[in-house]
Image (spheres, rainbow, N blue to C red):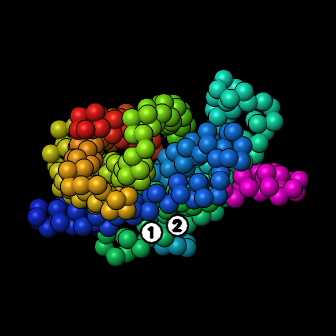
Amino acid sequence: MTKTNIAPAMPQVKAFLASFGQSILSLSFNFGGILAGTLAVYFSVFSITPWAIALFPGILSVRGAIGGLFAGHLGTDLHLGTIKASYTNNTKSFYLLLRSVIVLALISGVMIGLGTSIFGIFFWNANFTDFVGILAVVIATMGLSVLFIPPLTLAVSVISFRRGLDPDIVVYPIISTVSDIVDTLCYVFCLNVFFNVTSFGSYLIWLLDFVFLFVVICILVKNFKETEFVRMIKEFLLTLLSVTFIVNITGSLLVRVSNVIGNRSEVYMVYPALIDTVGDVGSIIGSTVTTKLALGSIKPSFSSIRAHTVEIRGAWSASMMLFFSYAAISSLTTGAKNLGGFVSFVSQLLVTNILAVSIMIFIAYSIAIFTYRRGLNPDNFVIPIESSLADTITTAAVLVALALIV
């Protein structure tokens, strides 16, 4: 019988505590969510070129989607036994998954680069030189990130599984925050090399691009007849179109949030952590559902959500505790003026949590059921789509909470 670390195999109370504890463990990494934005500001990323700030959110969103695909498959396949909890000599399914992630990183980079360039034509008079620079930097960034994120994801998956934890709960929430930081560092490096290391810098970035392209071509030539490989590529391309559209909506909402927030530094401080946490709760629910569907332990219908309450209550409770912690830390750091202001801020964040997390749970569960019933692999859709939607939904929830509680 295949080894599995799924919580409902235990009594209800113990299962809830296991789900809650593992959710707290993984979601607590979101305290580092602010670091990515801090790095970008510290290294003056957004002042290097007009398109730097436009490209940054797209890179993080697409890398998050690809990371979600990888983490989701690892969680499910470790439970099924089709991937081993090993760093070497793994299964054919693992290596096909890894190769598809590398190929998708290049395709996603090109699509984000094209989208940013088209956006730039209408909004900041982008020209052909901008288009070339955007493609060069985004492809190099995606190529560098591939060297770090998949190995880190595998390491977290293997360690968590070997220690009796559920990778569906632990892996993506941890990796999503780590990925934001690593991707930001890669982006900072590529931008600075491309623009600030004389003419040699641009040649180095182009060299990275061509090496990445060569690797992807070799992978495609070797694996284009592999059904599992081709399926992952095709299904994720559908997801990528959705992600690209969602990123543009989020950008519009961010402008409104800035207008409403004004100079409230305590909100700016917790905003990245809020988005990460909501997305991670969705990933926990979505990933655990896809595993249960694959194992046949729940039926592919929305009514089966009643058999998934342990994971939902555990992840949601953990997120509520973290939202309260964010409010407390932010208020202490920025200097809360009075108790009334702190209570108001806590209330705003808890309302944000209730609105955003409830919607994300519904979306993650629905995507898993919808794709499974249509013969698609839910791991190719659930985390990539919900992690991108989390930005938009959390931003909208913040707007509503600020309007309701003054």
Q: Residue furthest front?
A: 337
Image: 185 above or below 121: below
Instruction: Kindly tell me whether residue 388 is visible in this rendering.
Output: yes
Residue at (77% x, 42% y) in the render: 133
Dot 1 falls on a residue whose secondary structure is helix
Residue at (39% x, 40% y) in the render: 261
Q: Which residues are magenta?
A: 186-215
Q: Nearer the viewer, residue 313 or 269?
A: 269
Image: 318 above or below 373: below
Q: Contact, CB < 8 Å: mark 1 with mark 2?
A: yes
- Residue of label 2: 152
Q: Dot 1 surroundings within 10 Å: few (below 14), some, or many (20 or more)?
A: some
Residue at (61% x, 42% y) in the render: 53
Q: Quadrant of the N terminus?
A: bottom left
Instruction: Kindly tell me whether residue 71 is visible in this rendering.
Output: no
Determine if the magenta segment contains residue 196.
Answer: yes
Q: Residue furthest top?
A: 122
Identify residue type, mark 1. Val
Image: 89 above or below 226: below
Q: Position of residue 24 (x, y in %)?
A: 28, 64
Q: Position of residue 233 (x, y in %)?
A: 57, 42
Dot 2 falls on a residue whose secondary structure is helix
Determine if the magenta segment contains residue 104.
Answer: no
- Residue of label 1: 156
Q: Which of the 4 image quarters holds residue 327?
A: bottom left
Structural distance between the alpha carbons of marks 1 and 2: 6 Å
Q: Position of residue 123 (x, y in %)?
A: 64, 26
